[in-house]
Image (spheres, rainbow, N blue to C red):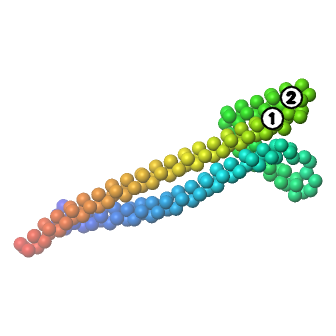
Amino acid sequence: MNSFQQFQTLGRKQLAIQEGLEMLRTIQVDLVKTRSSANAWGNVAILANATLIPLNIIVNAFELKAAGSVYQMFVHTLYKEFGKSGTRASGHGKTLLATLKQVVVDELKRKSLKQFIPGVNIIVGMSEDSLALMQAAATVSEGGREMNGLAVQVDQKIRALARQLTALGIQRAEVLDRLQKQSRTA
């Protein structure tokens, strides 16, 4: 390949790498925005779970009775589905706590000690809500680590491409020097 063709080839490679760098920098900016948004929503999830702990203690202490209106029925249904102790946790801990609660409640009913059931509901509910809070915090933390890892990978790729672009620029300058020497001697 003659020097002129080599100069053009190196120029095309430089252009492709420069475009790749621009795309990676755009991705880097988007990742920073996404990471910031994810952190904010993660904090909201943790705070929501933390807020539900005392709320569920109160609700478990004064167990929801039959709803009197459509609105109360709607709120009661939403609470049972999304806010009730144990609905946000998952895994073996949730199963263990549910089993423990059932065994204790059954034993209290068998011994005619029903007045202690709300206390069991409060203690087990608080444990379930604490478990959900810890799981939410772990999920947010894991997501943050993943996003930090992605940010590091993008940064490493940007630095590698920048080094490659510099090397190509040096090669292209050397080829240009040869072309200029050839044109002066010709």
Residue sitting farthest toward the left: 185
Classify 95 as above or below 137: above
Quick check: marks 1 and 2 in contact, CB under 8 Å?
yes
Depth check: 38 or 161 in front?
Answer: 38
Mark 1: amino acid: Val
Picture disc at residue 31:
none
Image-based side of 112 in relation to 104, left or right: right
**x and y, in percent, of residue 118 in the image:** 84, 38
Depth check: 3 or 178 in front?
Answer: 178
Q: Is residue 46 visible?
A: yes
Quarter of the image with the C terminus is bottom left
Residue at left offset 59%, top offset 57%? 40
* Circle 1 SS class: helix
Mark 2: amino acid: Leu
| Gap in angstroms between the C-alphas marked 1 and 2 | 10 Å
**x and y, in percent, of residue 58 in the image:** 80, 46
Q: N-terminal of the two: label 1 or label 2? A: 2
Residue neighbourhood size for the residue with mark 2, other residues' Cα within 10 Å, grouped as few (<14), some (14–19), many (≥20): some
Residue sitting farthest toward the right: 68
Depth check: 136 or 122 in front?
Answer: 122
Residue at left offset 63%, top offset 46%? 136
Quarter of the image with the N terminus is bottom left
**x and y, in percent, of residue 52 in the image:** 73, 49
Q: Is residue 5 visible?
A: no
Q: Say which residue label 2 marks.
A: 108
Picture disc at residue 120:
1
Depth check: 57 or 89 in front?
Answer: 57
Classify 92 as above or below 52: above
Residue neighbourhood size for the residue with mark 1, other residues' Cα within 10 Å, grouped as few (<14), some (14–19), many (≥20): some
Image-based side of 62 in relation to 156, left or right: right
Image-based side of 97 in relation to 20, left or right: right
**x and y, in percent, of residue 144 in the image:** 53, 50
